[in-house]
Amino acid sequence: EAQVTQNPRYLITVTGKKLTVTCSQNMNHEYMSWYRQDPGLGLRQIYYSMNVEVTDKGDVPEGYKVSRKEKRNFPLILESPSPNQTSLYFCASSSTDYNEQFFGPGTRLTVL
Amino acid sequence: RKEVEQDPGPFNVPEGATVAFNCTYSNSASQSFFWYRQDCRKEPKLLMSVYSSGNEDGRFTAQLNRASQYISLLIRDSKLSDSATYLCVVNGGDSSNTGKLIFGQGTTLQVKP
């Protein structure tokens, strides 16, 4: 089954404790992206990747890192999480940036 | 001004009604336009891409007006199952940020029996 998976789905952590949210797709897509969704602000792009070893900042990259060492995986890293990073996070992939994006189920992160 | 703007609603309509949403975008160089549907904090799913000539898929019609920089979504004969949030999505536009995708905050539709 073609899908985008994210782990964990739910995470409660404390300020400053490094964490990684994994994202994996099995559709051989070149384009992958991370978003956060907050009430009243909609979905905002954090980082995107057009291909392996190619990443670019989206609208809200501060406090986040990503890597794209292989095509299928695009982890999101929070080196020192802060409470303002409490949000719902979505990973997405598509064959190109102008085609349909397939979203993962979301990761609900709470930083205390 | 936000890069992509939508009226958040909510739009409350009876079953069978026709409802239209608009979305304006600020970057005239944008080339790709989409409508996504999102149910109650679940992942967004593509409803339709929006083409320059306009396109229709069953009860749904999408149109693009480049001169005025807006896209629209028309839903005819609304069903209860159409209740959701509809997200307008536009790409960054120029060669330096073509991979950047900008989402509107969404328009909430509630269809009542």
Image: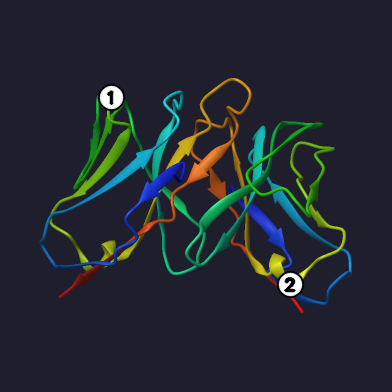
Q: Quadrant of residue A82?
A: bottom right
Position in image of residue B13 (x %, y %): 16, 67
Chain for disc number 1: B
Are the residues tagged 2 and 1 within 8 Å (C-beta)?
no
Crowd band around label 2 with a 10 angstrom C-alpha radius: few (<14), some (14–19), many (20+): some
Which residue in the protein does label 1 denote? B67
Q: Secondary structure at mark 1?
A: loop
Measuring 29% from the left and 67% from the top, which residue is drawn there?
B10
Q: Is residue B74 left or right of residue A34?
A: left
Q: Residue furthest front?
A: B1
Q: Is residue A79 left or right of residue A89?
A: right
The quarter of the rendered structure image containing the N terminus of chain B is top left
Q: Quadrant of residue B83?
A: bottom left
Tell which of A61 and A51 is nearer to you.
Answer: A61
Measuring 17% from the left and 60% from the top, which residue is drawn there?
B78
Measuring 25% from the left and 32% from the top, which residue is drawn there?
B55
Both on one chain, marks 2 and 1? no
Q: Secondary structure at mark 2?
A: helix
Position in image of residue B16 (x %, y %): 10, 62
The quarter of the rendered structure image containing the C terminus of chain B is bottom left
Label total for image: 2
Amino acid carrying label 2: it is Pro
Task: Report the disc number at residue A110.
Answer: none
As measured in the structure, the alpha-carbon distance from the residue carrying label 2 to the one carrying label 1 is: 42 Å
Amino acid carrying label 1: it is Ala
Position in image of residue A94 (x %, y %): 58, 37
Q: Is residue A15 left or right of residue A41?
A: right
Position in image of residue B86 (x %, y %): 36, 55
Which residue in the protein does label 2 denote? A83
Q: Is residue A77 left or right of residue B82?
A: right
Reply above or below: B12 against B106.
below
